[in-house]
Amino acid sequence: MNTAVVTECIAEASPRSLARMAGVFQLLEALTATFGQVIVLGRLVVAGNAAATAVNILGHERLFWVGFASCLIGVVFHIAWALLLYDLLKPVNRRLSLFAVFVILVGCAIQAVTSLLYLAPLLVLKGGSSLSAFTAEQLRALALMFLRLNAYAFDIYLVFFGLWCLLTGLLILRSTFMPRIIGALLAISGLGWMMYLVPPLAVHLFIPYIAGASALGEIPLLLWFLAVGVNEQRWKEQASAVGEWRS
């Protein structure tokens, strides 16, 4: 089956099927990004200790590569999730939905850069003769610096992700085919993630405020998509009103 056929099948899928696919990609993105960025790095990185971090990375190189691959695959899942949500929500307000998808595509690009910075410490530590001008201590410090840049880049991504959640929540609030409470909770979740505009403040507020807002907004959205999808009849009515539905 070629790409054109796959694209056509997706385009002709029912709104409920699109919603359930969005839920699947949301789950896959959460699992892969969390595993790579949070679990693997949380296990290997020792805050403020470049030597211990270098030992952990080199001693668990296979795990480090799996974490990198997981983060990169997560970007692909996120793009698919974003495009499916755009297709679902454009009957509500096409311009706002288009703006939202542009916001998250920028976020996904930053997420991809974050993955590159993820890999940089291993390349530095195994640079060999190409980095012979640096001492072992300097290389370890440089590797730790790249990990810090990875964390800052991820914080920037979270700001764009938060804005996307806010816009998506507003679109759901204005829809007739999904519960408005989910839209309100997702908008609150987005405001929480946007606190990473000031990372020290966000870190201070993460437990329980930002983490709680995220769970209250994103988990109900995921469960609703997987279990229910959307009210197909109301989706078609709203799409028909703005000329988006092709019968």
Image (cartoon, rainbow, N blue to C red):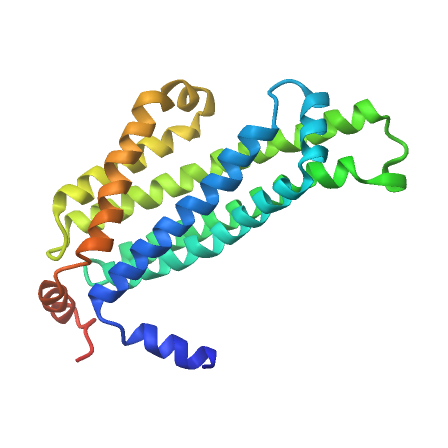
Residue drawn where x is 17% and y is 59% of the image: 230
Query: Looking at the rendering, in which quadrant would you find the N terminus?
Result: bottom left
Q: In x, y percent, where is residue 4?
A: 43, 80
Q: Is residue 55 visible?
A: yes
Residue drawn where x is 68% and y is 40% of the image: 61
Query: Looking at the rendering, in which quadrant would you find the C terminus?
Result: bottom left
Quarter occupied by residue 237: bottom left
Q: In x, y percent, where is residue 173?
A: 16, 47
User: Image check: 211 left or right of 37?
Assistant: left
Q: In x, y percent, where is residue 84?
A: 32, 61
Quarter occupied by residue 241: bottom left
User: Image check: 221 left or right of 176?
Assistant: right
Q: In x, y percent, where is residue 91?
A: 20, 63
Residue drawn where x is 58% and y is 50% of the image: 69
Q: Is residue 94 visible?
A: no
Up/down of 233 relative to 118, above or below: below
Residue drawn where x is 19% and y is 73% of the image: 245
Closer to us: 247 or 126: 126
